[in-house]
Amino acid sequence: MTSAPSRTNLPLGIAYIVAAFFCVAVMSAFGKAVSGVPVAMISFFQSFISLVLFLPWVLRHGWHDLKTGQVKLNIFRALSGLLSQVLYFQAVREMSLVDAVLLVNAAPLFIPLVAFAWNRTPISAAVGVSLAIGFVGVALIIHPSRELLTDPSALVALSAALFSAIALVTVNKLSATDKPDTILFYYFLIASLATAPFAAVAWKNPTPTEWGLLFGIGTSMALAQLLIILAYKHATASQIAPFNFSVVVFSGLIGWLVWHQPLSLGALCGILLVCVGGILSLMLGSTAHRPHGTFFHHGHGLQRGTTKAQRHEG
C-alpha cells in the first residue's frame, strides 16, 4: 500500500507538474531545432549536462544516497530509457513536434502490456477499455497505411514509447530499494557513459547557436526532473496524473508558433483519445503495474507511490 505525500498541497503539486512538462516541451523543441547535430551528440549532452546539474541535488544528503544494490537493473533501466531517447530525437526531426511528443507520451498505454509480459500482471477490463481508447487515438495520429513503410518516423516515435514503458516498469522494481534521486543519478551516469563513444565518433563541431540549444536540452531535462520530484512531494499520482499531458498542449503551441504546424481535426481527435486513454490507464491501473519512484522521460512523468526509503527522506 502506498502512502500520501508528507506535505499535501495540491495546487502547488499541480503547479510543479505543469511547470515540469512545460520544460519537457521546451526540451523537445530544442531537440527539433538542433537537427543539424548528430543524435548521438544530442543524447550525450542531454545526459551529461543533466548529470552535472542534478548532482548537487542528489548529494544534498551525502554520498550514501548513491548506494544501490541493483546495479544490473539500473543498467537495464538506463539502456532502455536511453534507447527511447535516441528513437525520440530521431523521430522529432521528421515529424511535427506535437505528434512526436504525443506518440512518445503514449507510454502509459504500453505499461500494462509490459507489466503483463514481465510479471504476468493481469489487465482488468477497465484498463483494457482505456488502452483501446488510447490506441484508437494512436491510429489517428500515425495513419496506418503503406506510407508508413516509406516514412516510418511515426513508428519510430511509437517504438520510443514502448522502450520508455519498459524503463518505467523497471523503475517500479528499482523503487523498492532505491530512492528517486539514486535512480536518476545512475540513469544520467550510465546514459552519459554509453553515448560518449558514439558522440565522439559522430562528432560535428556545433555552431554557437547549436551549443546553446544543446545546453538548453540538458538544462530543461534536469529542471523537469527536479520539478517532478517536487510535485510528487505535494500531491499523489492520481491527483496530478491528468496534468502530465499538459506537455501535448505546450508542444502544440510551440509547434504552431515556431514551425507553423497546424493540427487537423483527425489529429485533434487522436490527441484527445490518447490523452484520455493514457490518463485512464494510469488512474485505473493496479499498483502492481503502476510505476513507483520518480522518473521523467520525454514527457512521461512516472506515477509513484511513496516507498519506505522516500518516506524517510528529509
Image: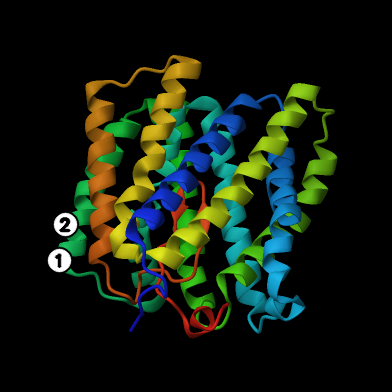
Q: Look at 29% across and 36% down and name the residue there.
A: 271
Q: Is 154 on the left or on the right of 84, as rendered?
A: left
Amino acid type of the residue that numbered disc 2 sits on in the rendered structure: Val
Q: How many marks?
A: 2
146 lies above or below 188: above
Q: Is 161 on the left or on the right of 90, as rendered?
A: left
The percent coordinates of residue 266 (x first, y second) are 23, 26
The residue indicated by pointer 1 is 125
Q: Look at 59% across and 51% down and name the residue there.
A: 83
Q: Is 187 on the left or on the right of 155, as rendered?
A: right
Q: Look at 80% across and 27% down and name the residue there.
A: 206
**Residue 282 appears in the rendering:** no
Amino acid type of the residue that numbered disc 1 sits on in the rendered structure: Ala
11 lies above or below 95: below
Circles 1, 2 touching at the beta carbon (< 8 Å): yes
If the image is split into quadrants, where does the C terminus sit? bottom right
Q: Look at 41% across and 64% down and name the residue there.
A: 234
If the image is split into quadrants, where does the N terminus sit? bottom left
263 lies above or below 222: above
**Residue 286 appears in the rendering:** yes
Farthest residue to the top: give it. 260
- Location of residue 46 by image quarter: top right
**Quick one: label 2, few (<14), some, or many (20+) residues within 10 Å?**
some
The percent coordinates of residue 220 (x first, y second) are 60, 43
Looking at the rendered structure, which numbered label has been put on residue 310? none
Q: Nearer the viewer, residue 145 or 279?
A: 279
Distance between the alpha carbons at the discs numbered 1 and 2: 6 Å
The residue indicated by pointer 2 is 129
Q: Mark 1: which secondary structure?
A: helix
Q: Mark 2: which secondary structure?
A: helix
